[in-house]
Amino acid sequence: MSTKQESIKLLIEEYIEANRIGPGDRLPSEAALSQSFRVSRTTLRGAIRQLELEGKLLVKHGSGTFATRPLPSIPSSLDRLYSIGDMIRSAGLREDEQLKSIQRVSACPPDIASQMELSEHEPMIVLERTRTADGEAVAHSINWMPEKLASPILEDGSFSGSLFQSLELQAGVRIVGAYSELTVPNDHDAHAARLLQQPQATVLLLKQLHYDELNRQVLYSLDYVRNDIFRFWVRRTR
C-alpha cells in the first residue's frame, strides 16, 4: 500500500467514526468520497480494498460499500490444548453453534482408523457443527469418536455444548492432550468454504488426535478455523 493510500485509509476510518456509521450502514459513493478527499478513484479504491481485507468494510458490487464490525483476533498457544468454545469465550465473544449432523457409521474410514489405531470395522459416531462468535461463523468441526465410548453423550440424537466436558461427565472419558497438525485446506474443500463468507477470511485446518489419561486415542477432529480470527503461536527455545 502506498503512503497516499495509507493516508486515505485513515481518513476513511475517521470519516466513519465522525459520522457514526455503524455495521451495515452504506458509505457514500466512490465518486463522492474521491471528491471529498480530493484524490483519484484509483487511490481511493486501494484504501477501500485494504479496509476490506482488514474486515472493516464490505464491498458489494452493484450495491455499494458498507461498514462492518470486525471481530477481534483470538490468540491461542499451540502448546496448550483449548476447545474452540474456550478460545471464543476467552476473547469475550458470545459463542454459539449450528449442529450440522450426527451420524452413526458402521465402519471407520481407513485413514482415521490408522490414526486412531482402530479396526476399519469399528462403529463410529461423527459429529459435525459450525461454531460462531457473536453470530459470525468462525470454525467448523468434524469429530470422529468410537461409538462404544461416545454413545452416552448422544443418546437422544442431538448434541450441544462442550464436547470435552460432555465426554468427561457423561462418558467418563477425560481428554488430556492432543497431537495437532496445522495445515492449509485445498481450494476445493467444501468444509473450508463454509467459513469464507467474509472477504478478509482465510482458513486453516487443524487435524487433531486427542487422547485420554490412559493414552487411548479417543477423538479425531478436523477443525477448520478462520485464520483472520484465530491467531496461533508457539514458544520455541534453543
Image (tube, rainbow, N blue to C red):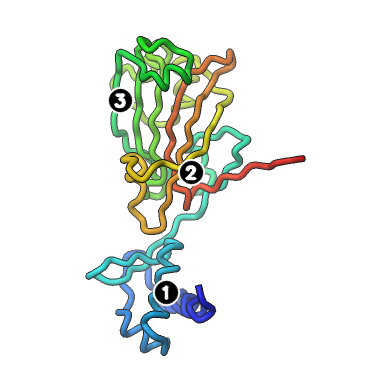
Compare marks 1 and 3 and give the one earlier in the sequence: 1
Could you tell me the amino acid type at mark 3? Answer: Ile
Q: Which mark is residue 102?
A: 3
Report the front residue among 117 and 234.
117
Q: Quadrant of the C terminus?
A: top right
Q: Which mark is residue 46?
A: 1
Q: Secondary structure at mark 3?
A: strand
Q: Mark 1 packing: few (<14 Cα in 10 Å), some, or many (20+)?
A: some
Compare marks 2 and 1 and give the one earlier in the sequence: 1
| In the depicted structure, whether residue 41 falls above or below residue 136 | below
Q: Secondary structure at mark 1?
A: helix
The answer to whether mark 2 and mark 1 are in CB contact below 8 A is: no
Q: Secondary structure at mark 2?
A: helix
Residue 23 horizontal side relative to residue 213, left or right: left
| CA distance for labels 2 and 1 | 32 Å
| CA distance for labels 1 and 3 | 45 Å
Image coordinates of residue 50 in percent, x first then y, are 45, 68
Viewer-side label of 2, 1: 1
Could you tell me the amino acid type at mark 1? Answer: Gly
Image coordinates of residue 186 in percent, x first then y, are 39, 42
Residue at position x 42%, y 65% in the image: 56
Compare marks 2 and 3 and give the one earlier in the sequence: 2
Q: Which mark is residue 88?
A: 2
Report the front residue among 207 and 94.
207
Residue 142 horizontal side relative to residue 9, left or right: left
Could you tell me the amino acid type at mark 2? Answer: Ile
The answer to whether mark 2 and mark 3 are in CB contact below 8 A is: no
| CA distance for labels 2 and 3 | 23 Å
Image coordinates of residue 28 in percent, x first then y, are 31, 79
Q: Mark 3 packing: few (<14 Cα in 10 Å), some, or many (20+)?
A: some
Image coordinates of residue 148 in percent, x first then y, are 40, 10
Q: Mark 2 packing: few (<14 Cα in 10 Å), some, or many (20+)?
A: many
